[in-house]
Every structure is written in structure tokens, then in C-alpha cells.
Image (cartoon, helix red, strand yellow):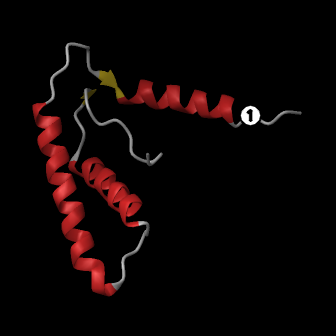
Amino acid sequence: MCRNIHTLHNFDPPATNDEVNAAALQYVRKVAGTTRPSRANQETFDEAVAAIAHATDHLLDHLTSSAPAKNREEEAAKARARAATRYATVG
């Protein structure tokens, strides 16, 4: 799975359109195997991103959770701590 696609469900505040579009773009790039489509494929690429973003919006709008919403800043701090541990230099 793409490392740049982050969980978007159950956050306060909810995921923004920019976050949904960024996740859709990363997904389409991964599936297509390219970060930039050729001019011949640009329209198809853009349509796929729009379709995936629409499906993601629909999914997020209809998912439910009994867990309390996560705080973005707290989750980002946890991710930074995990990265610091993972990428710590030995010395």
C-alpha cells in the first residue's frame, strides 16, 4: 500500500477535500505505475482521480464508528515518535 495514504476516517475535524484528493492521487499513481501520465493519458488519469476521490468521500460519509474521534495533532506526534525510533541512527 502507498505509504503516503493516511487513514482519513474518524478524525476531528473530518478529512478535507484536499486530503481525500491527495489520497486518490496517490492511489491512482500507484496503480498506474507513474507519477505523471503522458499527455495521451492525462484525461483518463484525471478522471480516475476524480472517481476515486468521489468514492472515498462517499465511503467516509457513510462509515460509522463507536470509537471516539482521533485528534490529528496527537496522531501526528505519535507518527513522528515512531519515525524517530525507526530511523534513529546508531552511534
Q: Position of residue 69 (x, y in %)?
A: 26, 20
Quadrant of the rendered image containing residue 80: top right
Q: Position of residue 38 (x, y in %)?
A: 36, 83
Q: Is residue 71 left or right of residue 67?
A: right
Numbered circles on residues, count: 1
Choose between 19 and 50: the one closer to the eye: 50
Q: Is residue 50 left or right of residue 37?
A: left
Choose between 30 and 79: the one closer to the eye: 30
Residue placed under numbered mark 1 in the picture: 88
- 8 is higher (above) or lower (below) than 20: above
- 14 is higher (above) or lower (below) than 18: above
Residue positioned 43% across, 66% down in the render: 33
Residue positioned 32% across, 54% down in the render: 22
Q: Quadrant of the N terminus?
A: top left
- 64 is higher (above) or lower (below) than 3: above
Residue positioned 15% across, 48% down in the render: 55
Q: Amino acid at mark 1?
A: Ala
Q: Residue furthest bottom?
A: 40
